[in-house]
Image (cartoon, grey):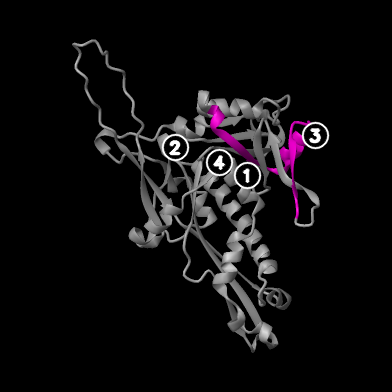
Amino acid sequence: MALFDKVNFNGEVFDTVVRNTPNTKMNALLKSGAIVEKPQYASMLSEQKGGNYITTLIKERIGGEGINYDGKTDITASARGNYTMGRIVVGRAGAWVEKDFVADISGDDYSAGAEEVSEYFDDLYQGVLINILNGTFSMSDAEGKKFADGHTLDITADKTDGTFDVTTLNTAMQKALGDKKGKFALAIMHSAVATNLENKQLVGYLKYTDKDGVQKDLNLYTLNGRLILVDDDMPVEHVDDAEGLGVFDKYTTYVLGEGAIEYTECDVKVPAEMSRDALKNGGETTLISRRRRVYAPYGISWKSGNIVSPSNTQLATGSNWEIASNNDASKKSYYPLKAIAIARIITRG
């Protein structure tokens, strides 16, 4: 019975193993450069707004017209401003009751249970990321709508096809960032869109070798040199004869550039623990695991510090987001939209 005694479970050791377990999707996002880890913000949480919301500054890029250096024209200096960017912590937890699972993780080797928990939170926070992107393209103010319009390529009105094709990604990237389109690193799309691209033989396949030396396919592709992640939680809208276009589904694909999302793993007082109830169901043990993370789209600010941890619905609500600004009502300025390396593509497949 010792294996089912929570005293034999070291939560800190287990959490360390979970954090160090390789996550295919997160590793791909980090390696692509689209998500940049910013651990320094974790220490700021205890200093601002009760540990769940922080405000950081973005330095305004220097600019202005060059001054004619002719020996008689005065050189004048212009002030460099700041944009403020709000970041919200998203906390998630999970708990599981399973005697075989408990037996696996109650010994000295935590790898079996840690891998499952790591994959669980990997999938959970990919859903969080998608809802954040949904929210940024639903911003309700004028500047937010300008961003959404300028960074969206919608080809569903093309009655002849309207599906993702060989030029679609390149066109969308140019529309969003112009001559800086090279910053884009990856796209996240629905499996229906990915299958369409597979059928057109437009994608390359990534593989990995497991610990036994066996090579396996990943759910990862490349298109035009950009990494492709496949996730069926991507937005799908059913259209029924809208403006004579017929009946079809609209699929949203998000494209992320280098540094588009800043990611911070935050502290949790008790990240993992086991709870023993000797009476329930004849005796059972529960594993509880907790995570707190920040995913901050660079140049876009979370507006409210009154929410302790936003739900996916709140993250997807556009009124909770705004373009980072200088907060100067008399001379309002916003973070340049062309510097936000996030784009959206809407297709029929």
Disc 1 and disc 2: Cα gap in Å? Answer: 19 Å
Which quarter shows the C terminus? top right
The residue segment tinted magenta is 181-210
Sort mark 4 into few (<14), some (14-19) or many (20+) by Cα contacts within 10 Å.
many
Q: Between disc 3 and disc 2, whose residue precedes? A: 2
Q: Nearer the viewer, mark 2 or mark 4?
A: 4
Place of residue 248 in the rendered image (x, y in percent of width and height, measured from the top left): 71, 36
Place of residue 90 in the rendered image (x, y in percent of width and height, measured from the top left): 49, 57
Q: Between disc 3 and disc 4, whose residue precedes? A: 4
What kind of residue is marked 2? Gly
In the rendered view, tell whether residue 277 sits above or below residue 144. Answer: below
Place of residue 325 in the rendered image (x, y in percent of width and height, measured from the top left): 35, 39
SS type, badge 3: helix
What kind of residue is marked 4? Gly
Q: Which residue is under mark 4? A: 33
What kind of residue is marked 3? Asn
The label on residue 144 is: 2
The label on residue 199 is: 3
Q: Is residue 233 magenta?
A: no
Disc 3 and disc 4: Cα gap in Å? Answer: 28 Å
Q: Nearer the viewer, mark 1 or mark 3?
A: 3
What kind of residue is marked 1? Pro
Please report the residue visible at 70 percent of the width from the left and 75 percent of the height from the top: 98
Q: Between disc 2 and disc 4, whose residue precedes? A: 4
Sort mark 3 into few (<14), some (14-19) or many (20+) by Cα contacts within 10 Å.
few
Q: Between disc 1 and disc 4, whose residue precedes? A: 4
SS type, badge 1: loop
Q: Which residue is under mark 1? A: 235
